[in-house]
Amino acid sequence: SQQGEEDPQALSIQEGENATMNCSYKTSINNLQWYRQNSGRGLVHLILIRSNEREKHSGRLRVTLDTSKKSSSLLITASRAADTASYFCATVTQGAQKLVFGQGTRLTINP
Amino acid sequence: SQTIHQWPATLVQPVGSPLSLECTVEGTSNPNLYWYRQAAGRGLQLLFYSVGIGQISSEVPQNLSASRPQDRQFILSSKKLLLSDSGFYLCAWNRETYNEQFFGPGTRLTVL
C-alpha cells in the first residue's frame, strides 16, 4: 500500500533557483526519510527526520515535518545541474520493519 | 566501510526461464536485507525483507521468492519468469530497522 505521495510528480527549474518537493503520508510514523536516485542507479539516502523533529538541515537541503498535517517538504537551495534526479520520500511506521516509498518527484535543473 | 554488491547489472531473459539475482554486503554483520522492484518512472515496491539467516518476509504475493543462505547474502529467484517480472531490482541493507537504508546499484531485468 502507498504511504508517501510526492508532489509535484515533475519539477523543472533554472540553475540557482530553489526547488521544493512535498510528501504526504497517511498513518503515524516513526521517521520520514528522503532519498535521491540518479537515472538507472540505486538510491542514495539524503536525510532522516524523526517524528519528534520539525526541521532538519544538511548542506543545501532543508527538510520539514508537520505530523499534524502528515506532510513533509524537501527544499534544495541554490540548485545545481548535478541535482537533477528523482527524489523519494519514505516512511517508517511505528513497529514496522520496513520503509514505504512514494512515487517520487522528478527534478530537472536547467543550466 | 560497508559496500553492497548486486549482479548481474543487466539481464535479458525469455518468458518461462528461471531467475537468480544475488546481493551481498561487505563490512557489516547481521544486516537487515531488502529486495525492491521499481517499474519505469515509478517508486519502489518492497518485495522481501530479512532480519536474519533463513528469515524471509514476503510483502507481495508473486512469482518470486527470496532466500538468505548466509548472513550477508540475499538471493532473489523465480522458477518461471513472466513478462510482468521486468523491472529494476534493488537490494538494500541497514543495521537497525528504523535507520536509513543503503542501496546497491540495481539489476535491470527485461523479460521477453
Image (tube, coloured by chain):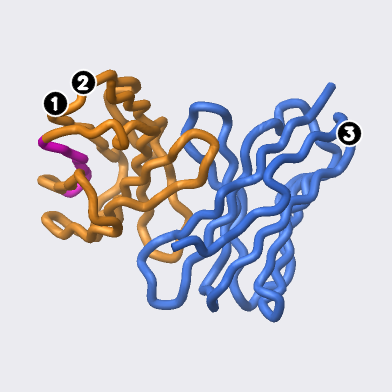
Chain colours: A blue, B orange
Residue at 59 percent of width and 67 percent of height? A25
Q: CA distance from mark 2 to mark 1?
A: 6 Å
Q: Which residue is mark 1?
A: B17
Q: Are marks 3 and 1 on the same chain?
A: no
Does B80 sit left or right of A100 as displayed? left
Q: Residue at x 44, y 59 (%)?
A: A99
Which amino acid type is shown beneath numbered disc 1?
Answer: Ser
Q: Nearer the viewer, mark 2 or mark 3?
A: 2
Q: Element at badge 3? A: loop
B97 over A40 or under it: above or below: below
SS at mark 1 in the image: loop
Q: Contact, CB < 8 Å: mark 2 with mark 1?
A: yes
Quadrant of the image containing the N terminus of chain A: bottom left
Q: Which residue is mark 2?
A: B14
Q: Alpha-carbon distance for marks 3 and 1? A: 49 Å
The picture places residue A8, in percent across and down from the top left corner, at 72, 49
Q: Residues within 10 Å of mark 1 (few under 14, many from 20)?
A: few
Q: Chain of mark 2?
A: B
Kind of residue sitting beneath label 2 = Pro
Spatial CA distance of label 2 from label 3 is 46 Å
Residue B55: give x, y in percent of width and height: 16, 59
The magenta segment: B71-79
In terms of secondary structure, what is the magenta stretch mainly? strand
- Quadrant of residue B111 within the rendered picture: top left
Q: Amino acid at mark 3?
A: Gly
Residue A98 x %, y %: 39, 62
Q: Nearer the viewer, mark 3 or mark 1?
A: 1
Question: What residue is shown with label 3?
Answer: A16
- Tell me if A55 is positioned left or right of A3 in this view: right
Tell me, yes or no, whether the two marked residues, 3 and 1, touch with CB atoms within 8 Å.
no
Q: Residues at marks 2 and 3, common chain?
A: no
